[in-house]
Image (cartoon, coloured by chain):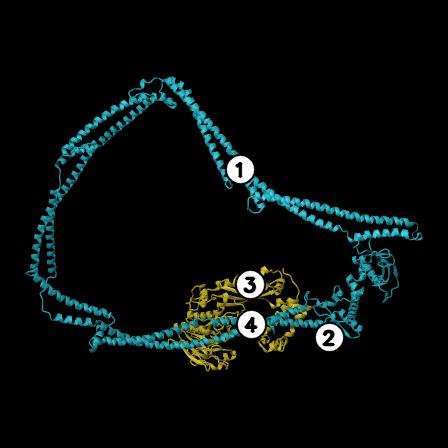
Amino acid sequence: MKIESLEIDGFGVWNGLKLDGLADRLTVFHGPNEAGKTTLLQFIRTVLYGFSPQRRQRYLPPLRGGRPGGALQIRGPAGLLTVTRHAGATRDSAPGELRIATPAGTLEGDHVLAGLLGGIDETTFNHLFAVGLREMQELGTLSDSAAAELLYQLSTGLNGVSLAEVLGELAASRERLLAADHPCQIEALLDRRDKLKSEIDELRGLVHRQASLTHQHNELTGAIVGHETRRAEMEQQARLIEAAVTVRASWRHRESLLDELAGLPPLAPVPPDALERLAAIDRRLAERRLRLTETTKARRAVRREIASLAFDHRLDRCAPRIEALTEQEGWLTTLEGQVEHLAADLAAQEAELAQHKQALGLDAGQSAGELPRAAARLAKLRPAARAVREPRVRRKAAQTELADSQALADTLASQIRAGLRHTSDKELSPALERAGNLVAQLRRRVQLDERLEQLARHETELAEQGRQLLDRQLLPGWVLVALGSVFVLGTVLILSTFFLSAAVVGHAGWALATIGALGAAGAAGGKFLLERAAATQLDVCQKQAGILAAQIKQSKQERDAVDAELPRGGGPLLTRLQTAEKDLAALEELLGVESQRQAALKTAAAAQARIEAADADGRAARRRWRQALAAAGLPENLSPSQAGHYASRRRRLAPLESRLAQQRQELEDRRRELETLTGRIRQLMADVGLEAADGRASDQLIRLRQALADHQTVAARRDELLQRAERLRRRQAKLTRALSRGEAQRKRVLHDAGAETDTALQARAAEQARRQSLAEQSEQLSREIAAALAGRLSEADVATWLQRDDADNLETRWDELAGQIQAVHQELQELFEHRGRITQELEALAGDRRPGERALELAEVQEQLRQAIERWRVLAVTELTLDSVRCMYETERQPEALADASQYLQRLTEGRYTRIWTPLGERTLRVDDGEGNSLPVEVLSRGTREQLFLSLRLALVAAYSR
Amino acid sequence: MSSRPLRFIHTSDWHLERPLSGVADVPDSLRAVFRDAPYLAAERVVDAALVEKVDFVLLAGDIIDVELAGPCGVAFLLRQFERLRERGIEVYWAGGRSDHPSRWPAAIALPDNVRRLSARRPEEAVYTRDQTPLARIAGLSRHRSRKMRAEDFWPDADGLPSIALAHGPVERTTLAARAMSYWALGGKHTPATLFDSPHVAHYCGSPQGRRPSETGPHGCTLVEIDDAARVRTRFIPTEVVHWRQQRITIDPTTTREALERSLVERARSFLAGAASSYVGWPSRPSHGDDAITAVTNAGASSGSKRDGLEGHPPSAAWLVSWTIAGHGPLIAALRHGPLAAELLAELRRQCGHATPVAWSVSLELEAASAAPPSWFERDSLLGDYLRSLAQFETNDGPSPALASRLDCLLDDRQRAGRAACVLAPAAETDRLRVLQKAAALGADLIGPEETLP
């Protein structure tokens, strides 16, 4: 694509510019600053890629008018094309209206322009084909474009990962495993491995310790066996001696017994049980004799007791009669109760009858039939009775009201007294007056203070004003100067009129004189007026000060008077005023209470008047009631309520009298029956010899019954003693017969034993028993000897020691042996303890798993170390391999564009810089100089950088052209 | 010869001093198992001898390093010998590298049923049953400087079955030339039979695998020699902890949840298999050590009593190393992010705390999946990188090449100090693994982005 001409309708400073015949290879536009060279560059960019917002803002509208836009004539593979682009009128952001036309006028589509541009985007175009001076200086502008791929295509295949970073991470990982200057994993593992090996080496000695202990154990076992054999032999010997000593006394005793038995004469045997039978018979006979004596004594005692009993034969005979009467005891008691009840009932009814009669106004001898029928008369008494009741009711109500009112008045009076407790007055009114006066005086006192304060302020102001006015009596300097100047000027004008020639002052001389005169007069008059006004103001002020002083004096006198009336003390005035106002308010509240108390007193007086009226009415009514009773023929002392009960009482009086007569008859009958029974009881008491006493019949009967009970007790005891005496008699006979049989048996036993007497029999039996005892003692000693030997030793073994000459000194020999055994035992104990300790240590060694545990830990550490070393090798191999690949890429596989750029740069710098290259995986450029040094772009001089960038762009253009 | 064939147990490489290794982070719940697994396995060997009513037991070296194992190991070994002595079972013990006869403490007497064999010259013994000689046993402990020679052993002149007991590497041909009935060899942790006809030369292996790479069966060998001098062997598994390597293949449609489910199911299948495949194990009396007793009881409680030893013994733990293979976005996620660690944590959470336990040791991508071979052909930075890794695969010895290239990353002080360990010569497998991981890491850093399904 080649631009052959351009035509600018309007764009920035250009208007109607048309450039034809541009050269085939190179066209240079030159001009001063702001001539429009950059505008021309932007125009070309705009026609090819449209109006960007920035270009619209900067170059539109055209400064010199014209339609915004223009055209380029471009020769491409398909021939010459006219590309026209104008900005739209309304759409600011649109790229503009594009029109592509052939020389024949045929319009082409937008794709034709894209084809002409070879698919190059605007950024690449701007940075490669239409580059400005500023863009030329920035390598980053290339990195932003599609051309960067032509420069940095080495990085393909890294998935966006920086190879330098990868290598760095590999090296860092490897350093973590093994580093020269800081702690690392492999070093730590090596330390741990060495430590474990050291521990294992130390543990190797355990086996030698085990062997040593085993050796000691075996030696100790041999020593223990030897000692135990010795001890067993000595213990056996000691056991024999001990047994001999133990049985020695028994042994010798047994031998003496056997010798004694052998020397005794022969003896006739005594039947085995003869002595026992004889003794048994004697015991039985003695027992029976004792029992016979006791039985005889008991029988005599019974007889004496029977004789001593007080048995009453009369009472025994009358017992059936007493029991028959006792059966009627219940009836007797009932009868006595009925008589007493009837008598009491009769007395009560007689009393009631007497009361009724008294109530009806009858004498005791009069009966109910003698009373008049008074129903009609009673009806006439009712108004008089009501007249008596009505004043009584009124009086009661008035009394109640009087009491309530007096109580209320007392309560209110106590409230008032409580309110006046803090005052010196006993009455409310003077206290209220005194409090009001105090409040008024205090308020007046406070007002006086305020007024004095106000007057003092006013006085101070007047004094200040007076001083100011006094100062004004002399006019200020500037006023005097001004007035003086006016006066002098006026005077000068006047004088000049007179003393200067008319030629000088002309016609204005009189006018000037007039003005001068007026000025001088004005200045003098002004001065006079000002001074007079100041004097007047001072005078007024002084008069006001005098009036004010008089007012202050008067107020102070008034304040002193008030202070003299006020009580001393009490704190500040305001506080006292507040307290006094509070007291006054409290007293004013008591006024309401006082009015209530007065009302209550009035109510009480009215109630008292009503009571007196009711009393008068009551007296008149009672007088009329007595007159009515007299008229009705009733007693005068009958009250109205009694008169109300008159009829009912009269109706109940007759039945009461009839019932009273019946009860009197019944009482007589019961008394007769009671007398009959009482007679029988007294007769029976006389028969049994008891003395009759006064009192109730039932009490007499109880005495009889008690006497019979006592008699029955004595009779029962007498029967019992008689039976016992009979039994004792029969036992006495039986014991007598048994004694006879026992004597016969005793004689038979002595006869059978061949003894004449029991003494001879006993002597023979004693001798026989002695011999038997000796034999038994001998056998007992043999058993004791066997028990002492306990079956472990034979008498023959012991006999060898007991038959020796030194048999009496066996204890000494035993003591010697015991000492030797103890010594051996002690040695054995020590050997056992020593061997036990060794055994315990051997067991502890056998249970010590440290060697295995350390070996396991070492195996773990060695495996960890192996893995770490393998990991280090993997990282190292990977790092070295990647690095070798990087070197290969950087030397052999640089992009073609960089190779072209290297040639351009070498030509531009005349061989000073020979190569441009990019590291693998990085989007940077490095430049090799002629001496083989590799330099980054940043360290190059500005000129060299521009040559470098120009070379890069030329190479890229060539790459695009290819 | 007696009607009952001669029976004996051939065992070696107990290495009581060595706990399990190769795991960088042993969980607290399994520490006792890691420490005691060699003891438990050795105890099971003795159990097998008691159950099978063998005539004698041959210990072919490397039973215990007494200094490293400590008194606990010595006491344990004496206890096991005592158990055999109580049943009248003889023990012939040829020393290896770690249990030379001179290293046994002289003060600690071995039971009288144990016979230690010299390292200077072969010792011979004729085993008799009811005063009838049944076999001639010739044994030699490993000499510190001299290699074992087949010429040191002679077959019995009277035609008795001859058994040679030794430790260390041997040449198969020289052994085959000697007409010994049975070569009882020790020194290899994995069972191996050099030849089995007409005679037998056999490494019985260790009763317990020690590291993740020892994944095969471990136990002892029961040997029977009949009247016709025919030798029959039977492997008896004794290991308590099983090392396993599991490979899971995924495709582009595999989701994370599916992979996690597959891993957990596979881990649980071990536990189910441990319970179902075990058909019996004799009950044994417990011993003093608490940790050992606890593990032993936990295993013994899962089986019923039985005379034979077929099937798997009860296991205390399964230690699994996972390898993920295949291709697809999930592979990229495993290579890039924390997915592998999360899956490992989930596996441990779900299966790592049961009894028996299936503990996941590691979870890694297969090398071919981490960096597929097609990437090596790419014309890209990654392709250039992967091809550049070949510079570490020179022919002049792989390790020096790797070490010399890495040497430039250390300074002089580091080269002279302990840090030089990173430059130590590595095995071929280690060097290949480093290069594979470097390829995976490079792909992770500069490889293509892929998204999870």
Q: Which residue is mark 1?
A: A430
* Labelled pair 1, 4 in contact (Cβ < 8 Å): no
Q: Determine the residue positioned at 80% across, 48% down.
A: A526
The chain letter under disc 2 is: A
Amino acid on which the number 2 mark rests in the picture: Asn
Mark number, residue A717: none
- What colour do you see for chain B? yellow
Give the alpha-carbon distance from disc 2 to disc 4, as whole Å.
43 Å
Residue A930 x, y percent position in the rendering? 76, 76
The spot of residue A905 in percent (x, y) is: 78, 72
Which quarter shows the N terminus of chain B?
bottom left
Viewer-nearest residue: A277 or A817: A817
**Apparent side of residue A349 relative to residue A299 in the rendered image (left or right):** right
* Identity of the residue drawn at 11% across and 46% down: A301
User: Which amino acid type is marked by label 4?
Assistant: Leu
Q: Vertically, is A720 above or below A112?
A: above
Q: CA distance from mark 3 to mark 2?
A: 53 Å
